[in-house]
Image: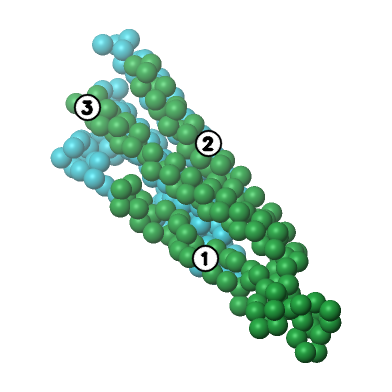
Amino acid sequence: MSFSTLNIYSTTTRQLQWAAARQKILNQNIALANVPGAKALDLKPLPSFGSFVLKESSEDCTLKKGLFSQRFKTFALKGNHHLSGNTIDAEEQLKLTNENVLFNKQVLSIRQKFSEIFSMIV
Amino acid sequence: MSSFISSAGMSRHLNSFANLHISAAGMKINRLSMKLISENIANAQSTAQAPDRNPYQRKMLQVTNKLDPELGVPLVQVDKFVLDKKEFPRVYRPGDPGADEKGFVKQSNVDLIIENHDMRQANYLYRMNLSAYENTRSMMLSVINMINKK
C-alpha cells in the first residue's frame, strides 16, 4: 500500500457528507419528538475508515462513479413505543448528534493532517 | 483531481443550511405550543357568560411534517389549531349570570396539571432542538475553519 494510492480526500469527503446527512436525520428526529406516530430514523453506518480508504482507492472512485450522487440509506431505530406511536427518544437523539459532531471533527482533523503531509511532500 | 473532488464535496457539505432550518422549525413549533399553553392557563378560570353559551375551550396544536419546496427537506409545521372536545366541568353557582335553571355554570375545560406538563415538555423539547441546532452549527463552522486554513 503506497501513500499515493490512498484517496484520502474522496474518502473523507464522503464521510463528511455522511455526517451532514446524518445530522439532518437526527435534527429531524428531535424536531418530531412530540409528534404522534413519528418514527426515529438513522443512517446506515459507513464502513470502517481503513477498509473504506482501501476500497475507495482501489476502485478509483471519482465523479464517473457518481460519488456525489450516491444517497445514504436510512433505517428505523428500534425504541419504546409511546401510546401515540412515536418511537423517538429525544435524549438518545441528542447523544447521537453529539457523537456525530465528534465524528465530523475527527474526519476533519484526519483530512487536515494528510493535507499537511501532502504539502510537505509536494 | 482530488482537490476538485474535495472542494465540490465541501460545498455540498456546507449546503447543509437546511439542517439548521429543521431544528429552527422544531423550536418554532415549541414556541407556538408555549404561547398556546399560556393562553389556556390564562383562561383556565373563565366561565360561561350565559347559560346557552360555552366558556373558553382549551386550544391544542396539531403539527405535521411537510416537505419545504425551497429547502427540499421536510420541516415540522403547524397543521391546524384544534379545540379540545372534552366536556366542560360544571360548578354550582346559583347567582352567576351564566348559571342554568339548576344553578350550575359551565367552566373552561382547561386542566392546569395537563397544561403544566405540556409546558414543561415544550420547554424541554425547545432546549433539545436548540442543542441540535448548536451542534449542527459547530459542525459547519469546523468545515469553514478548515477551508479557511487551506
Residue under the point 44% across and 47% down = B22
Instruction: Name the quarter where the N terminus of chain A is drawn.
Output: top left
Give the SS element for disc 1: strand
Q: Is residue A106 visible?
A: no
Rendered position, B83 above or below A112: below
**A117 or A86, nearer to the observer:** A86
Answer whether labels 2 and 1 touch (C-beta < 8 Å). Answer: no
**B87 or A5, nearer to the observer:** B87
Residue under the point 34% across and 16% down = B150
Dot 3 corresponds to which residue? B4
Answer whether labels 1 and 3 touch (C-beta < 8 Å). Answer: no
Answer whether labels 2 and 3 touch (C-beta < 8 Å). Answer: no
Label 2 in the same subunit as label 1: yes
Tag 3: amino acid? Phe
Q: Earlier in the sequence, mark 2 or mark 3?
A: 3
Give the SS element for disc 2: helix
- The Cα–Cα distance between marks 2 and 3, rounded to whole angstroms, is 29 Å
- The Cα–Cα distance between marks 2 and 1, rounded to whole angstroms, is 30 Å
| Image quadrant assignment for residue A117 | top left
Disc nearest the viewer among 2 and 3 = 2
**B39 or A107, nearer to the observer:** B39
Dot 1 corresponds to which residue? B81
Residue under the point 70% across and 59% down = B42
Disc nearest the viewer among 1 and 3 = 1
Position of A78 compared to B56: left or right? left
| Image quadrant assignment for residue B52 | bottom right
